[in-house]
Amino acid sequence: MNLRLAFSLAMASLWYRRKVLALVTLTLTLSITLLLGVQYLRTEVKQSFTNTISGTDLIVGARSGQLNLLLYTIFHIGDATNNIRWSTYQKLQDDQRINWLVPISLGDSYRGHRVVGTNEEFPKYFRYGRDQRPELQEGSWFSEVFEVVLGAQVARKHGHQLGDDIILSHGGGRTSFSNHKDTPFTVTGVLAPTGTPVDQAVYVSLEGLEAIHIGWESGVAIPGRTVTPEQALERDLTPDSITAALVGIERKVLTFQVQREINEFRDEPLSAVLPGVALSELWRIMGQFENALLGITGFVVVTSLIGLIAVLLTLQVQRRQEVAILRATGASPMLIATLHVIECVVLAVSACVIAVFAGAACISGLSPWLLETWGVQIGLRPLNGMEWLMIASVPFAAFVVGLIPALQAWRGSRKQGLGHVMPE
Amino acid sequence: MPDMTSKTDLPPDSSATTRQVLHLSNLTFHWDQTQAPLSYPDITLNTGEHLFVRGPSGSGKSTLLSLMGGLIVPASGTLSLLGTELTRLTSGQRDRFRADHMGVIFQQFNLVPYLTTLDNVMLPCRLSCKRRNRALPTPEKEAESLLTALGIPPVHWKRRVTGLSVGQQQRVAAARALTGGPELILADEPTSALDSDNRDRFIELLLGLAAEKHSSVVFVSHDQSLAGLFDYQLSLEVTQ
């Protein structure tokens, strides 16, 4: 059989019917873009998730589930169940097996962004991605009580410069009515973008947090008991408690031993979790939704393939004349059937090609917005094996469903005489 | 012959000097079991001889052409083309045979709408090596000279056929049927959509070019006035 002839006829026929077929190809393209986009994003988001924290061996907080602890310390989602005492923190510091400790104190916010109370250990030991440290884009890490370092997105969103004064709010939430307005903080540094929740946070010293809460012991400012910044500095600003601590273990083999001991700590109930384990648990839960989403997009592709076949079957009625001519000229029913399959596959392949380019354009167009609004860093990368497999499956599926009109054409053209062909 | 009569002066059954293009004997066909079979008179046609077939609707004219074209197989009888017994071939072999040795012209809508005029004419050369090799000097040159002979202006050659008039379309179809010099041309009422001027011009050109290529034409028509242009005529009738 003459494949070259079939191919050139199929291409001419597709071009002739381009107006009708452009629409179904568009539908198919959109659905493939969706499918590919979902698959691409879930790989990227997973990467982004696992990039959130690295180098930390244990996260220590008040007794709670590992997911909860991970979510509020690292992702700044949800709230701590309880605090841990400063004395506990000091005991951990004295432990020989523990190499470093980063204290984390949460509870306040700045225009919806979490305020993280910590110390100079944070820039020294906190790591994300592939062992990357949060770098300062400009300025320096805080050294005074009323100094603040902003995450990249916080600075960009609110247009803050070094030297700006900002007022923190008590508690979380985007609009808080109780502001620590007596005690403004001065911006001394802005962090470089990391694509992690660090970009969305505001970093102050533990002492600073302590200072702004003098007179706020009952949860609101009691008039007469609050202090001016000058008065605060004269007080002892050692905190009573912190929310959590990130722990680095000197010898990694001791991690489980330390974890067990912390979990069995006598003075107060504590939890120590392995970030990697907690992340994979988080991912398992997220994975369910993702699989559902992927399943739905898969069905969208199937639906548009069915739409394509419906259009091709409808067109077939108009093609009786052309089939009669080809048959009379000596084309075999097989050639007629091949023509249909080729058309179907060519449409699918072109839809795939357009989808890849459309997807790439979407991602490069949306990635600044995604980083800005969601703090998710998604860049262009070569497609992985799974994604190629998905793309390849579309023309294959088109080939399979293309057999339906092909078979119909084959049967029809076998029975066809040399007679007149009337237009429909 | 139960339901059909022939009143023809058919060519003699054997011709020693010229090559036999077509030979039918005791041919019957039925579309389904409930209908009485159609049966055809014996026909023999030699190279370069033309046959005119007429008869009312339902007399089996188009069926006869489909049988000759090898698109359908007879219920009984022999049907031999160029010495090949068509009934013994598989459907694939019959398709190939048709591509190699036959040109076909329909009543109307003869052309593949998405191909150019030239591509339509050269279609048989792409489906058959034999036709391609006989299209001299090249398929394209031959197609161009046929189109010129048939009075299709060169501006239409590289354009899609949808811009052609009905008369032009039929002449392009004739060019396609003639390209590569097939031994047999089957024409199914090709002039019924044409006015009388166009019709006369069409027949004249078709028969003239067929003579050049040594092709035999089997021409089906209602139009008795054309019968005189053909060597033989066959009249099919419906009888109850």
Image (cartoon, rainbow, N blue to C red):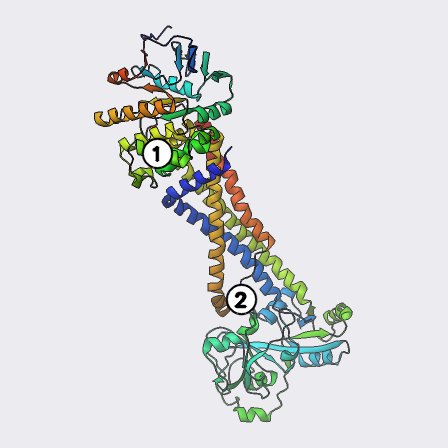
Residue at left offset 52%, top offset 69%: A375
Image quarter (top left, top right, bottom left or bottom right) of the N terminus of chain B? top left
Residue A255, position in %: x, y? 75, 69
Q: Is residue A337 above or below residue A96?
A: above
Quadrant of the image occupied by residue A115? bottom right
Which residue is more in the foreground, A4 or A235? A4
Quadrant of the image occupied by residue A264? bottom right
- Under circle 2, the secondary element is loop
User: Is residue A72 something that shows in the picture?
Assistant: yes
How many other residues sit within 10 Å of disc 2, few (<14), some (14-19) or many (≥20)?
A: many
Which residue is more in the foreground, A67 or B113? B113
Q: Which amino acid does label 1 sit on?
A: Ser
Image quarter (top left, top right, bottom left or bottom right) of the C terminus of chain B? top left
User: Is residue A314 something that shows in the picture?
Assistant: no
- Under circle 1, the secondary element is helix
According to the picture, the residue beneath numbered tag 2 turns out to be A376
Q: Is residue A304 above or below residue B204?
A: below
Q: Disc 2 versus disc 1: distance between alpha carbons? A: 68 Å
- Tell me the number on the disc at residue B145: 1
Residue B3, position in %: x, y? 35, 8
Q: What residue type is labelled 2?
A: Val
Residue B187, position in %: x, y? 34, 23
Which residue is more in the foreground, A154 or A399? A399
Residue at left offset 26%, top offset 34%: B165
Circle nearer the viewer, 2 or 1: 1
Q: In this view, does A263 lie to the left or right of A128?
A: right
Q: In this view, does A155 lie above or below B70?
A: below
Residue A188, position in %: x, y? 54, 85
